[in-house]
Amino acid sequence: MSKRVARLLPLLTTAVLAASSLTWPADPIRAADTALAPPAATGIPPVSDAETGWVMKTLHQMTLEEKVGQLFTTRVYGETADTTDPAAVQMNRSFLGVDNAAQAVVRYHLGGFVYFAYAGNTRSPEQVAGLSNGIQQVAVTQPSRVPLLLSTDQEQGAVVRLGPPATQFPGNMALGAGRNVDDAGTAARITGQELRAVGINQDLAPVADVNVNPANPVIGVRSFGEDPTLAADMVAAQVASYQDAGVAATVKHFPGHGDTAVDSHSGLPVISHSRAELDRIDLPPFRAAITRGVDAIMTAHIVVPALDPSGDPATLSHPIITGLLREELGYDGVVVTDSLGMAGVRKKYGDARVPVLALKAGVDMLVNPPVMQVAYDAVRDSVRNGELPESRIDESVTRILRLKWRRGMVAAPFVDPAAVSRTVGTQDHLAAAQRISDRTTTLLRTDAATLPIPAGRRVLVTGWDDPAAPATTQALGAALGRHGLATDVLSTGVNPSAARIDAAVAAARQHDTTVVLTNRATGDVGQQRMVAALAAAGVPLVVVAVRDPYDVTAFPDVSTYLAAYAFNDVAMNSLAGVLTGAIPPAGRLPVTIPDPARPGAALFPYGAGLSTP
């Protein structure tokens, strides 16, 4: 071991000196056109002497407190590592007991942070790069000199933390509708390159859940669809592409969150699949990810009686995490929890017990505990009192350190803020995103008198939108205008009132065609009433689901219906192209849409989709 350490010391010295002086590489991210290159070879890379030497040397020198800190990744408020913004400081004090990220690193010896838009972490790419560098500067000057995992949920589509100018894609179910594995890989590679350019070295993606339940309130379009083989192929392609871009992929939510009608953020779902069903439906994408050498797997706060009859959620289940994931599936990478602040993991045990039980189950990294000090003290004290042997902590810290080495965080913990614009949101990336999106829109019903909409027609775009920032209806209106249509926009927000519905109907009567957007309308009476009122008015009507395609079950009599799967600009550009006949509706349903009038029957089967308007 001493020879290995001796060989490693020059590399360590170089890395530490680079960190302390904030010396930038010329361009840490490859040129944008390499986004379309094929993924790297699959599988887990061999362990090098340099990796083993650094990991063992670092682990040996760490105190118990430093080891415990490596197990935690948590959110933090503020745009900079040393923020003094009063609002951010107040939030950090209540959650972390410190003022900012820099103080949290020193106090808890953290393993990582998770960036969120609501926490003020992702205002712009350059700001994110500065935040990342500031955090890593503090980390590499601590006694252990271990850089941090800086992660976020950049799933694309419905779940995005880093918005424009970063490249936006339509999301997993849209990719499933496109049926193109290469497109899935390209989307992940571009996303990974842009994240790495701003210092985010772990993406909490892709979602590997197989969405077989139309009533699923938390997965839906975040899934590639209901076909396990399609999901497995897409997941494997994205894992390879993220990691080829230098970003740790994190597939979620093990052992599968696709068949539930309960949101684990607010309740504790129970998955009733038999072991045979789990093997056939839920586990194939995770097996594929493991074969590709995925860096991390996130647990689900779900009860799976077929795997563990105790009633414990998977996150806290030794039979599921150690028995199934570690021993049966042979996974020895990093296992991370979903947020420990979610109700699904807090229903049965107190906040001081949850992190300890997760570690006993076989988890490595504990994400977003409700109160950091409580969770940290609980884990440290469990080692001191003998409940958790320090060797168990060492196992997890070793896995975390290996991940940090393999993704280049030790050799290059910093990014160059001046180089961000050469990677994030480049024209090549944006063009690739639009090409991919154009292959995903699905046409399920059409009236020849309605589509395609010819140039010169007066079109009203109305329906669902974010009430705080009605960007989706505006984006579609602008896109239709670029196709030569005279377009007016009337956003009705979420669950429109009777007055808003009346206004939409009156406006529709003044236009040749009305396009109404819906979002999870099956659970929204206002949206249902609005579509019904527009249909009753007898105006030429096009209904488009901009999230889950199941909305059509609420409108059985609508004659023209499309699924866009996403509500961002790139999806609206594609939708406009389909509505005007400029591009064909190439997407095919990646899920079955059930017929509410005939239990067990399909209103639209898996693979449905019309080729022309």
Image (spheres, rainbow, N blue to C red):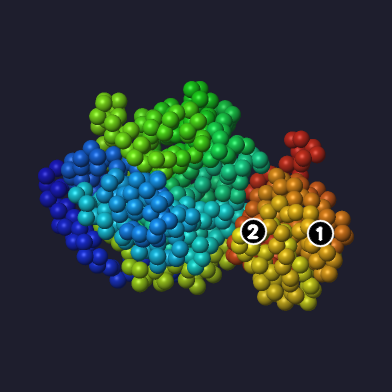
Mark 2 or mark 1, which has the lower sequence index? 2
Residue 50 at x, y = what percent?
A: 21, 50
Mark number, residue 211? none
Question: Compared with residue 341, is residue 317 higher up or lower down, i.e. above or below?
Answer: above
Q: Which residue is mark 2?
A: 467
Residue ranking furthest to the top: 309
Residue 226 at x, y = what percent?
A: 61, 43
- Location of the N terminus (image quadrant): top left
Badge 2, how many Cα within 10 Å: few under 14, some, many 20+? few
Q: Residue 171: tell me if it is visible.
A: no
- Location of the C terminus (image quadrant): bottom right
x 40%, y 45%: residue: 95
Q: Secondary structure at mark 2?
A: loop
Residue 258 at x, y = what percent?
A: 58, 40
Amino acid carrying label 1: it is: Asp
Question: Compared with residue 360, is residue 184 higher up or lower down, i.e. above or below?
Answer: below
576 vs 427, left or right, is right
x 71%, y 47%: residue: 524
In this view, the residue in front, 567 or 564, is 567
Q: Secondary structure at mark 1?
A: helix
Q: Are marks 2 and 1 in contact (CB under 8 Å)?
A: no
Q: Residue 300: tell me if it is visible.
A: yes
x 37%, y 63%: residue: 129
Amino acid carrying label 2: it is: Pro
Residue 313 at x, y = what percent?
A: 48, 31
x 15%, y 53%: residue: 9
Q: Which residue is mark 1?
A: 502
Badge 1, how many Cα within 10 Å: few under 14, some, many 20+? some
In this view, the residue in front, 274 or 516, is 516
Calculate the distance from the C-alpha at mark 2 to the C-alpha at mark 1: 18 Å
In this view, the residue in front, 188 or 16, is 16
